[in-house]
Image (cartoon, rainbow, N blue to C red):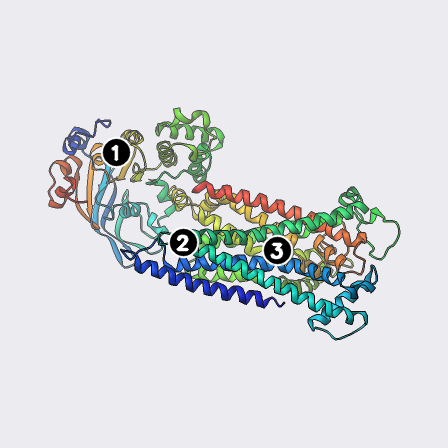
Amino acid sequence: MVMQDTADTPIAEMAQSNASAEAIEPTERKMRAKGVSVYYGDKKAIDNVDIDVYQEFVTAFIGPSGCGKSTFLRALNRMNDTIPSARVTGTIELDGDDIYASGMDVVQLRARVGMVFQKPNPFPKSIYDNIAYGPKIHGLAEGKAELDAIVEKSLRRAGLWEEVKDRLQDSGTALSGGQQQRLCIARAIAVDPEVILMDEPCSALDPIATAKIEELIDDLRGNYAIVIVTHSMQQAARVSQRTAFFHLGNLVEYGHTSDIFTNPTQQRTQDYITGRYG
Amino acid sequence: MSPAIPLLLAIGLGLAGWLVARARAWTFKRAAPDGRIAALPSYHAWYAALWIVVPLILWFLIWNGISGQLVLNYVLASPEAQSLPEFGLRRDSILIEARNIAEGNAGLGMNDEAAALAEPFREAMQRYSLIGLVVGLLIGGAGAAWAFLRLKPDFAARTKVERLVLAGLLIASLVAILTTFGILVTLVYETILFFGKVSPADFLFGIQWNPDPMSTGAVEGDRYGAIPLFWGTLFIGAIIAMIVAIPLGMMSAIYLTQYAPARVRSWVKPALEILAGVPTVVYGYFAALTIAPAIRDIALALGASNPSSESALAAGLVMGVMIIPFVSSMADDSIAAVPQAMRDGSLAMGATTNETIRRVLVPAALPGIVGGVMLAISRAIGETMIVVMAASTAANLSANPLESMTTVTVQIVALLTGEGSFDHPATLAAFALGFVLFMVTLALNFIALRVVKRFREAYE
C-alpha cells in the first residue's frame, strides 16, 4: 500500500487505495484547534483555523509554500514561543486542556507533543546519547539497564535498530540522511509522546529513504496521533487519513484524505491538487 | 641625493606614462570598428604606469643600498684619504664627519682631517647620484618602451594589471610572515649565545632565579634556573586568570547568545569589546593601586601574617578580567554557530533552555570554546604590563597566591632595562626566556587554530 509505484498512479486512486483513509472512524480526539490565528509581529500568518487531530490517525497539512502550514504545526507544541515576535490567539487543546493557558508547562507539553523537523537534526553526540537525551532530561529511566532498554525500543520502533545496533557509540551525524531522520524520529519516540508533529520530514531525503519513513509513519500510527506537513500530495494521499489544505494562511478544506483528493468541495483545493497552482 | 627626488621622478614619469597610454588606448578605441577594445583605456594606462614606476622604484632601492659603499670606495681611493689612520674608531669618525660636512648637515668639528675629505665626498656623491638618476631614467624609459610596444587594441591589459595587483598583495602578506621569521632568527641566535654560557639543563630545570647583571668572572649556572618564572607565568596567566576568565566569559557568552533580548545584546557586546581595547597598562594601574592593596587588607583581616603588597592573586585577577572579552567573544561565536536546528531539536523534546545550553549547545560548541580559551591563555602568558606593575620581580616558587611572584615577561623587561652589558649572560637570558615564551605561545596558537578549524568544518 505504502510502497506503491508513485510514478503512474493518479493521486485520487492512491488516496482511495489507501484503505485506511476512509474505512476507520476516529475513536478519540487528541487535539483541537479553535479559531487559531498566528501573527508574526503585525503580519497575520494563520487566520482563524479550526482543526481536530485524532488519536491513531495521520493528519496531513498540504498547501503551497508560505501558506502557513508549518507555522500552524509549530503552534501545536508552542515551538513558536522561540520566535520573539510570534503571537497565537484562539485556543488549542490537548486532551481538553488549553495548551496556551498560563498554567501550562511548556516543557511538559513538548514532551507530550514531540516534533520531527524538515532537515534531520541529530545532536553531535553518539547515536545512543541522541536517543537517551530525552529520557535522561525527563527522568524516564532509572539506571543504565532501563535506559538501554528505552534506546533499543525506540530504535526498533523507528526501524533503525538492525542498522545501528553494532555502532551505538558512533556519532549520530555520521549516519546517512534517511538514517538521521529515523534517528530523529526514534529520539522523539523515546520520550513517549502522545502526538508527533512532522514538518516535511522527507523533503531532504531520497525516494528510498522517503519510502522507509512513510512506512514507519504508517507503523507508528497505531500508538500516536501524527500530524505531518508535506509538499508532496502523493505523500499525503499515501500516509494520511485526514488532510487539511491551507492557502494564504486560511484553512480552505479539511476532511477525509480520500474526499480531499477525489472529491474536493472547494474550487481552490481542486485547482491545487490537480496542479493548476502551488 | 635626497630620497624625494627619485620618488618624485618615479611618480612624474608614471603619471606621464599613464596619461600617454590612456590617450593611446582611446585612439585604439575610436579606431575599433565596434568601439570596443580588449580592456578599458584606464587598464592600459595602469599597465604602462606600473611598468615605469615599479622598475624605477626597485632600481632606486637597490641603488640606495649600494651607492653608499661606492661613494666610500671612491673617497678612499682619492689622494686625500691616504693620510687616514688604518683602522679603528678614529678613522670611522673622520669618515662620518666628512660625509656630514659634504651633505651640509654639519660644520667642521672635532677632526680637522675631515675638512680635507669633504671635497672628495661631495664629488663622489654628485657623481653617483647622477649615475643613479641616469640609470633610473634609462630603466624607466625601458619599462615605458616595453609597455608601449605591447599596447594594442586586443592587448589584455586588464589581466596583466590584475596579475601585478596580485603580486603586490602577495608581497604585502609576506612581510608579516618574514618579520615573524626574522624575529625568530634573532631570538635563536641570542639564545644560542646564552646557552653557550649557561647550560640549557640549568636554565630549564633549575629552581633558583637570581641573575646578577653586574657579576664578572665565572658564570654561575645555578643562578639561572627559570622554573620559578615558568611557574609564576603559569600560575598567574594560565591558572588564576583562567579561573576568572573562563566562567565569566562563558556565562556572558551564554547570556548574550541565548537569553539577552536584542536590545541588551546590542549594547552589552560592544561594551565587552571595549574592555578588550583598554590598554593593558591601565589594567596595570588598577591592579597595582586598587586590587593589590585590597587583597593585602583582606588577607590581613583574615589573619595572614605579613602578606605581600604585590601578589600573584592581584595580577591574575585583573588579567582574568582583561581576558574575559576574548573568551566571551570566541565562545559567543562558537555557540552562535551551532545551528538553530540543534536548539529547536532539543527544545522540541521538552528540554528547558538551560538543559539545551548545557547538554547540546555547549558540547557542540566546545571545540571552538577550547580554541578561544587557548588563544586567551597564550595572550595571558605573554602579557607584560599588568604583571610588571602588580606582581613584583621576586622569583618565588610557591603555590600561595598571596605571595609575590614574577613572570617570564617581567624578567625580560627587568633584564633588558638593567645595566648589564649586552653580552653578559644576564642580558642574554632575556632572549632565552623570550624564545621559550615564543615557542610556548606559538604552540598554543597553533593548536588553538587547528581546534577551531576542525570545529568550523563540523557544520559547514
> In which quadrant of the rendered view does residue A187 lie?
top left
For the residue marked with disc 1, what is the amino acid? Glu
Q: Quadrant of the C terminus of chain B?
A: top left
Q: Find residue B27 and report its horizontal and vertical position in percent.
A: 34, 61
Q: Residue at x 61, y 57 (%)?
A: B62
Select label 1 or label 3 by which is in front.
3
Q: Residue furthest right?
A: B217
What kind of element bears circle 1?
loop
Q: Quadrant of residue A262?
A: top left
Report the disc number at residue B320.
3
Whether B273 is drawn above or below B368: the answer is below
Residue B289 visible in the shown view: no
- The residue at which mark 1 appears reads as A56
Image: B67 above or below A49: below
Same subunit, labels 3 and 2: the answer reads yes
Percent position (x, y) of residue A71?
28, 48
Q: Which residue is mark 2?
A: B157
Q: Nearer the viewer, mark 3 or mark 2?
A: 2
